[in-house]
Image (tube, rainbow, N blue to C red):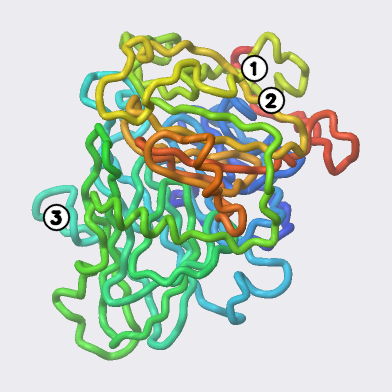
Amino acid sequence: MLTVNNQFPGPEIRVKQGDSVSVTVVNQGNYGVTIHWHGVRQPRNPWTDGPMNITQCPIPPNTSFIQNITFTTEEGTLWWHAHSDWSRATVHGAIIIEPAKGTLFGLPQNTPSHTIVLSSWYNGDVMEIGKIADTYTGQGSIDSDASTINGLIGHYKTCAPGHQESIYNISVTKDTTYLLHIVNAVMNQNMFLSIAHHNLTVVGMDGAAVKHINTNYIMISPGNTMDALLTANKDPSLYYVAATSFVNIGRSTGFDNSTATALLKYDGDYSEPAYPAFPHDTLPQYNDTQAATKFTTRLRGNVKQSVPQDFKVRYYITTTVTPNRCHNKSCEGADKIFTATFNNISFITHQISILQAYYENKRKDIFDPNFPTYPPFYFNFTMEDTVPAFLNAAPNGTRVIMVKHNDVVEIVLQGTSLGTEDHPIHLHGHSFFVIGRGHGNFDPDNDPMFYNLDDPPLLNTVTLPKRGWAAIRFQADNPVKDGDSDESKMLAPPHYMPPCSAE
Ligand SMILES: [Cu+2]
């Protein structure tokens, strides 16, 4: 399997706010890859942000690419991952950012920490599995075989009958408080996590502070990160840490229902129990939508940035995932592949950097700057029954949302019955305020009256329920090509960008 420095998960990057970090990515694998710094806003320097065929072409095998990561106001936990095909499954790791002055989230000096990375495990080559999963076979997506905590499956699942899997130990000392840096790097599933007999206090999410949440479980979506305090205040012993999927109502595909475990292991002399306590009472069931909603509705921001009270432009965007006709050679013989759409347009990636096309004014050849501000057809998006059949054949295109520098943009994301599951939706180069969420169809007359414009969480990834909506707001303040000052102007691309085969 493809890993970074032979580690799964990959190495942790620890930095201070305001640092600039240079990473030389040497590709010793046998296919092209890119690496993305998830949640790092990369002001002025989108060139090494990483998404394949958006900001760069893949780094070819046996070559290297120097990537600069520019940290500004991010604080706490973020993560990095491959951003090409399915290689992210095994190529990822945590990023921990401490403030330049003071302590992380104002915690006491020298608060010890542990990092917990949740990942998917596939019995097989993920790149091959990814190709099959993208092809429409009528059976739905391909699920992982297990989830892991820091690369290990633990005691509640085995990959072979009679085989005892290894378990990760989190060492703690009684009466000590730890900051846990938690990353959900699984491919496709929301996760519940709970620790037997111990509570957590969530203090940060997606690299920003949140108002403290005391809880005995968390729900974390793919792409999200959390910082949570854990006080080791129970009798010295072993306690299970358990993570399992949360599957929202209406998911129409299968899922990996395995439970990953680690052990919270106290220091000291005690006889280890044969059966450590398991969080049976506090780890929600996989289908406990109420527990998930209860947790997410408690999320409140605690950041200094002011929340934009109004917006300049609003996009209303529906999402679908449907079998669609094949439009390029990536289908490899299949006549249909799974495609995702926004406003019923399936995005075509070219073997070229769209960012470079923008920078060099080649946009007319490469992309259409008129992404529609609302869906082409209105129907009851979240109804349970059949939907108009013509919506199953989405047009393809490379349509781009063009926004004015510094405009406040509101995007209302609308889930539809033409999806398979909840969709984590992520924005590069910005964090956004999640100002509203709801079930059913968004009502533009009434729902905005209930927006949270006081203390919404500042996130970089929001999970859109299949049968619901989410509203986000952000200022498009990342520097642009024609900025009128140095601070508002993006840098020119490095001369050593990976080559694009379509050029
Ligand atoms: Cu990202």
Amino acid type shown at disc 1: Asn
For label 1, the residue is: 370
Which one is earlier in the sequence, the residue at label 3 or at label 1?
Answer: 3
- Where does the image place residue 248, in percent across and percent down from the top left? 30, 44
Furthest-left residue in this view: 162
Q: Quadrant of residue 357?
A: top right
- Disc 1 crowd rating (10 Å Cα; few below 14, some 14-19, many 20+) is few
Image coordinates of residue 53 in percent, x first then y, are 58, 24
Above/below status of 86 relative to 211: above
Above or below for 316 versus 170: above
**Measured from the top left, where is residue 305 in percent x and y?**
70, 57
Q: CA distance from mark 2 to mark 1?
A: 7 Å
Q: Is residue 222 above or below residue 393?
A: below
Q: Residue at x 38, y 27 (%)?
A: 381
Cα separation, mark 3 vs mark 1, equals 55 Å
Q: Is residue 62 left or right of residue 477?
A: left
Residue drawn where x is 48% and y is 45% of the image: 462
Nearest to the observer: residue 274 or residue 182: 182
Identify which residue is drawn at 68% across, 66% down.
99
- For discs 3 and 1, the disc positioned in front in the rendered view: 1
The residue positioned farthest toward the bottom in the image shown = 269
Q: Alpha-carbon neighbours of circle 2 within 10 Å: few (<14), some, or many (≥20)?
A: few
- Cβ atoms under marks 2 and 1 closer than 8 Å: yes
- The reply to whether callout 3 and callout 1 are in contact (CB within 8 Å) is no
Of the numbered discs in the image, which one, if any, rests on residue 402? 2
Residue 134: percent from left, percent from top: 35, 24
- What residue is shown with label 3? 163
Q: Nearer the viewer, residue 241 or 56?
A: 241
Residue 421, by quadrant, is top left
